[in-house]
Image: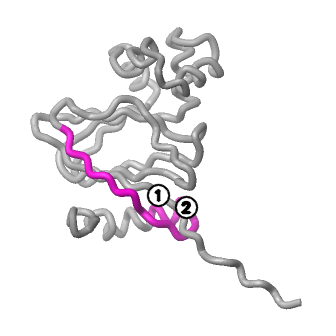
């Protein structure tokens, strides 16, 4: 990845980021499954999650340009959907999110300006400038950050994301008998 995208060094060699991750995780980790993003102005991604077996989270780093992130836990998103009238209760909201083919819900979370304003009012909007990173938990399918990304400004943005995986520290030494 570093040969193809030398800008990976900006993340791999960022001591403050590495120190923060080490402190949060409390165990050796690796950043892998690197993805390069280059979004056109007003481009981005609709609401989704990045939960994957064995992954602790995702580190997204903005290298050029700016992006706006709408991000919150699946459960918080479900609670806001209930308040918004999109579901009768949290369990039903989560079921609708899990189905993934609910056109009405998709329109609400991705195209409804008043819903985006509700997310903002609940502290679920973050703007990343060049040099910023955002860490999104994704320990399990039901304990992960859902997020949507919008490129801001009139120039394309450049960013990387990395899956955060705990390193296997090897077998535990057996104690003597």
Q: Is residue 118 magenta?
A: no
Q: How is the image coloured?
A: one colour
Considering the image in quadrants, where does the N terminus appear?
Answer: bottom left
Can you say whether 135 is above or below 121 in the image? below
Image quadrant of residue 31? bottom left
Disc 2 residue crowd, few under 14, some 14–19, many 20+, Cα 10 Å: some
The single residue placed furthest to the right in the displayed view is 177
Magenta-colored stretch includes residue 38: yes
The residue stretch that appears in magenta: 20-39
Residue at the image point whose x is 41% and y is 66% from the top: 18
Horizontal side of 27 relative to 12 (left or right) equals right
Q: Position of residue 176 (x, y in %)?
A: 84, 90
Q: Residue at x 50, y 66 (%)?
A: 29
**Mark 1 neighbour density, 10 Å: few (under 14) some (14–19) many (20 or more):** many
Please tell me how many numbered marks the rendered image carries.
2
Query: Is 28 placed above or below 152 here?
Result: below
**Which x, y percent locates residue 62?**
26, 50
Label 1, on which residue? Answer: 164
Residue on which the image places disc 2:
25
Q: In this image, 86 relative to 120: left or right?
A: right
Q: CA distance from mark 1 to mark 2?
A: 10 Å
Figure quadrant of residue 92: top right
Residue 107, numbered label: none
Task: Look at the numbered disc 1 and give the secondary structure of its residue.
Answer: strand
**Badges 1 and 2: C-beta atoms under 8 Å apart?**
yes
Q: Residue furthest bottom?
A: 176
Residue at the image point whose x is 10% and y is 39% from the top = 155
Secondary structure of residue under mark 2? helix
Q: Give the farthest residue toward the left.
A: 154
Return the x and y of residue 68 as percentages of the image width and height: 29, 35
> Where is the C terminus found, in terms of image quarters?
bottom right
Label whose residue precedes the other's in the sequence (1 or 2): 2
């Amino acid at each position: 990845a570093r040969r193809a995208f030398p800008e990976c060094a900006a993340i791999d060699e960022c001591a403050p980021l590495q120190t923060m991750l080490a402190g949060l995780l409390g165990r050796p980790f690796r950043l892998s499954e690197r993805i390069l993003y280059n979004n056109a102005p007003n481009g981005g991604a609709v609401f989704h999650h990045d939960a994957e077996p064995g992954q602790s989270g995702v580190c997204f780093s903005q290298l050029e340009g700016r992006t706006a992130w709408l991000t919150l836990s699946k459960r918080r998103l479900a609670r806001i959907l209930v308040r918004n009238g999109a579901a009768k209760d949290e369990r039903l909201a989560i079921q609708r999110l899990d189905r993934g083919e609910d056109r009405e819900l998709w329109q609400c979370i991705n195209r409804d300006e008043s819903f985006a304003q509700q997310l903002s009012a609940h502290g679920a909007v973050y703007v990343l400038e060049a040099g910023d990173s955002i860490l999104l938990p994704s320990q399990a399918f039901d304990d992960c950050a859902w997020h949507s990304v919008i490129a801001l400004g009139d120039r394309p943005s450049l960013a990387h994301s990395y899956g955060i995986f705990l390193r296997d520290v090897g077998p535990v030494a057996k104690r003597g008998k």
